[in-house]
Amino acid sequence: MTPDSLQSQSGDAVIPVSALNRAISSMLERSFPLVWVSGEVSNFTRAASGHWYFSIKDANAQMRCVMFRGRAQYAEFTPREGDKIEVRALVTMYEPRGELQLNVEAVRRTGQGRLYEAFLRLKAQLESEGLFAAERKRALPSHPRGIGIVTSLQAAALRDVLTTLARRAPHVPIVVYPAPVQGAGVGAKLAAMVEAANARREVDVLIVCRGGGSIEDLWAFNEEVLARAIAASAVPVVSGVGHETDFTIADFAADVRAPTPTAAAELVSPQRVLLLRELDHRHAALARGFGRMMERRAQQLDWLARRLVSPAERLARQRAHLRQLASRLAAAGARPVRDARAHFALVHYRWQRRRPNVAAEREHLLRLAQRIGSAHERRADREKACISELAARLQVLSPQRTLERGYAALIDAQTGRAVRAPNALKPKRPLTVHLAEGSADVLLADVQARLSDEF
C-alpha cells in the first residue's frame, strides 16, 4: 500500500500496521535524501554478523543508527562511545518495530570533511606552483655520512626509526631535530627544524616522520609552511608520516614518500650486512686481480730471462733451428711424390678389381649355351612323348575304331542329327548309315519296336 492509496481512502478505512509502517518508510525515503548528520556516539554495538548498531545524540535529541557490514568494512575507523562523528545516512523506518532510524552509508569524525576540503585546496595550489614536480625530486645518497630525524622525542615512531637504523647501519651517525608533531603551531616548528638541519649541514639525508592517527592528528604535516620548507631543503627529505594509507602534503613535497617511519629508515640506511658482504666480495676480487697480475709479471720475467742468452748459445740455437727447417723442407719436397705414388697404387688396385675377366665370362657363356641346348632337347623329348600318348588316346577314343568293331551310325537325313532312340525311326524316312568303310543312304520301309534293349 502506497501513501497515495492511503490518502485516497476514507477516514473509516482500516489498514494493517505493517502496511502503515511500509507507507511511512517509503514516504521518509522519498522525502529525505542522503544527508550528513552530526552527533555523539552512544550504545555502540558490533553484531556477530558484522553490522554496527549505535545512536547519535546531541543535547536535545538522539537517533538510532544501523550500518550494515557491506558498508562498515570500508570505514576508516571504528566509532567509540562518546566520539563526535558525522554520518552520511538515509532516513528510514525499521518496519517490524515501527522505529525511526538512520541507515548509515559512511562515517567520519566531526570536522573531517572540512579538513579534507582544505587538504585538497592546498594540494592543488602547491601542485600548480610546481612544488610536487617530479623533476624537483632528488635521489637519496646511497651511503650517507649522517642521517637526520625531525620528530618528537616522545614519539613511538622515533623509537622504531632508531631501532631500524641501529640494526641496518650502526656505523652511520644520527642527529635528532626535536619538534612536536601535534597541536597548534606545530607546522611552523617542524619547518624550523628542517631549516635548522639545512643550516647546520650535519647530515646527508633527512627523515620527517610521526606515527599514525586521524586526519586531525596528522594535520600539522598538511600545513603550507612545512611543505614549502621541505621543498626548499637542500638536503634530500624522506617523509614517513602515519600508516601506508595516510597521505599528507609533506609526502608530496618530499623527495621520497615512505609508507611508514620504519620504511623511511630502511630507505635512507644502507644495510650494514650487505655492505660488509660487498666489501668481502670486492676484497676477494682485488686479491684475485692482484694474483693474476703477479702471475702475468712472473711469466713476463721468465720470458725476458730466456731471451738473455750468450751469442754462442744463440748461434747454436739458430743452427739447430736451420737444420730443423732443412729437414722439414726435404720432407715437404718428398711428400708430393709419395702421395702421388700412393694415389696411383690405389687407382691401379681399383682398376684391377673392376677389370672384366673375358676368359671366365666366355667359359661361363659356353656352359650356359650347353645347358640351354640340353634343356631344349629334354623339352622336345617330353613334348614328343606327350604327343604320342595323346595320339594313342585319341586313336582309342576315335569313332572310326568303334565303327570297325561292327557298329554303325544312323544320321537323320532331314535334321542331320544322330538317331539314338528307336522311337525316332519313322517309316519312309530317309537315313544315312555310316559304316567303317563308308556310308549309305537308306529309306525305312517299316519300323518294328523291340521289347528289350538286349541283343
Image (cartoon, rainbow, N blue to C red):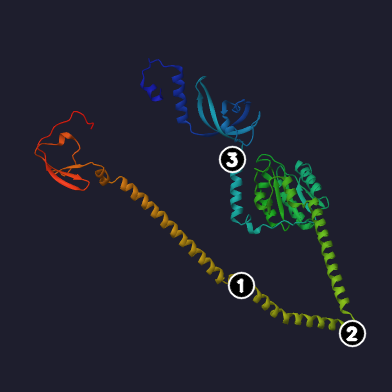
Q: Residues within 10 Å of mark 1 (few under 14, many from 20)?
A: few
Which-is-in-front pick, marks 3 and 2? 2
The answer to which of marks 1 and 3 sits earlier in the sequence is 3
Q: Looking at the picture, how far across and down is residue 387, in whole percent?
A: 36, 52
Quadrant housing residue 216: top right
Q: CA distance from mark 2 to mark 1?
A: 61 Å
On screen, residue 295 above or below 377: below
Q: Quadrant of the N terminus?
A: top left
Disc number placed over residue 352 in the picture, else none: 1
Q: Is residue 361 left or right of residue 157?
A: left
Q: Tell me, yes or no, if residue 244 can be seen here.
A: yes
Q: Is residue 10 left or right of residue 268?
A: left
Disc number placed over residue 113 in the picture, else none: 3
Q: Amino acid at mark 3?
A: Gly
Q: Find numbered disc 3 in the image and state the secondary structure of the residue it sits on.
A: helix
Q: Looking at the picture, how far across and down is residue 48, in whole percent?
A: 62, 25
Q: Which residue is mark 2?
A: 311
Circles 2 and 1, Cβ within 8 Å, touching? The answer is: no
